[in-house]
Amino acid sequence: MVKTTISLLKADIGSSPGHVTVYEPLMVRAEELMEKAKDENVILDFVVFNAGDDTELLLSHNKGVDNEAIHKLAWDTFMTLGKEAREIGLYGAGQDLLKDAFTGNIKGMGPGCAEFEFEERPAEPLLVFAMDKTEPGAFNYPIFQMFANPFNTAGLIIDPKLHEGFTFSVMDVYKNKFVDLSCPEQMYDLLALIGAPGKYVVKYVDSKTPDLGRAAAISTDKLSLIAGKYIGKDDPVAVIRSQSGFPAVGEIVEAFTLGHLVSGWMRGSHRGPLMPVSLEYSQCVRFDGPPRVVGLGFQLKNGIFIGGVDLFDDPSFDSTRARVNEITEYIRRHGPFEPGRLPLSEMEYTTLPNVLQKLEDKFHD
């Protein structure tokens, strides 16, 4: 059976005003380029959307992960959009495009990527999530909730297909190494790592049922480690399979109801609550935030995205958004003080070290 590959690729190619949202004509341009690629049979189907100031390309194909043609399509698209963004003076035009020439794979070049391949089930629910103004580790909490916490996901207790648990592949983003941890047996080990989301990030989740395979993939690229300096937050994305051996759609979206604290927000230097919003409200305004997450849901059939639901366009999330606004009001009152501002250990790749360097010679005994 031919496997389907899902690739979700993103980049900040320029926005207006400042870091608020993607300029609509560039979204239309991206759709035109994807339609051309579909006509040429490079991809099976696509969806173009935005999360704040990031352009998101959701692609389906049969070419497998890390495919050069797919990654070049995304890279060329982002380069084209970045060039057009510069011509009309958009802010931060092409800021995520850290290399001059494509080298065969988009990873390590600035744009984020979450992808995996699998054999489609007769009915294949697929959910995708994209965050803005935060780091890859922001997915640690909701991914744990979905796949390891029975207080969130009832299926871990009452569904035999989920009862054995899942395996988490955790990446040390500074050493570029992975460790695989099986839950529930190694849950405490997992939490010991992913509770430090600035260093340890969940990259993949796999079912322990062999014929089901991969359940989720998350982008883990950290722009500051690639560029060697702060140029913007990483704004991660995730692709998640649902139902019939995986958490139900309702269990997956339930993981975003806390409004948990994440790193990023203004100048990538603050903590703030993550707000689940509809696509209509994915623009980041207050203090360049608060950090946002958008979600889309589809049925997948032979690589075609069927339907399409804006998952957080739901009044049941109003209480979460109200709580996020209350937390936002509270934590903003801290101003430049920790924990509103990130600790110095996490400010290494921001612009603060340049300020502190001027004071270095002024310290005295």
Image (tube, grey):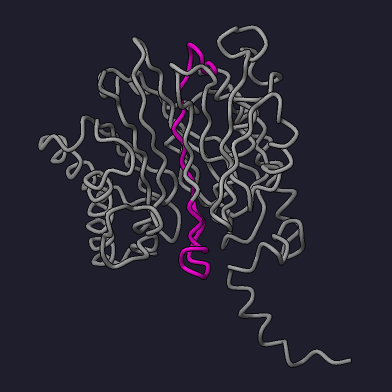
Magenta segment includes 7: no
Please state if 230 lies on the left or on the right of 148 as rendered: left
Q: Nearer the viewer, residue 346 or 294?
A: 346
Give the image location of residue 25, x and y in percent. Answer: 25, 49
Q: Residue at x 46, y 28 (%)?
A: 240
Give the image location of residue 365, x and y in percent. Answer: 89, 91
* Residue 91 visible in the snapshot: no
Q: Residue at x 65, y 57 (%)?
A: 270
Please state if 306 lies on the left or on the right of 292 as rendered: left
Please state if 202 lies on the left or on the right of 104 as rendered: right
Q: Residue at x 48, y 52 (%)?
A: 221
Is residue 204 depicted above or below 33 in this figure?
Answer: above
Residue segment shown in magenta:
221-248
Q: Which of the image's four quarters has the N terminus?
A: top left
Give the image location of residue 263, x and y in percent. Answer: 63, 52
* Residue 327 visible in the snapshot: yes
Is residue 354 depicted above or below 21 in this figure?
Answer: below
State the predominant SS element of the stretch in magenta.
loop
Is residue 242 depicted above or below 346 in this figure?
Answer: above
Q: Nearer the viewer, residue 286 or 348?
A: 348
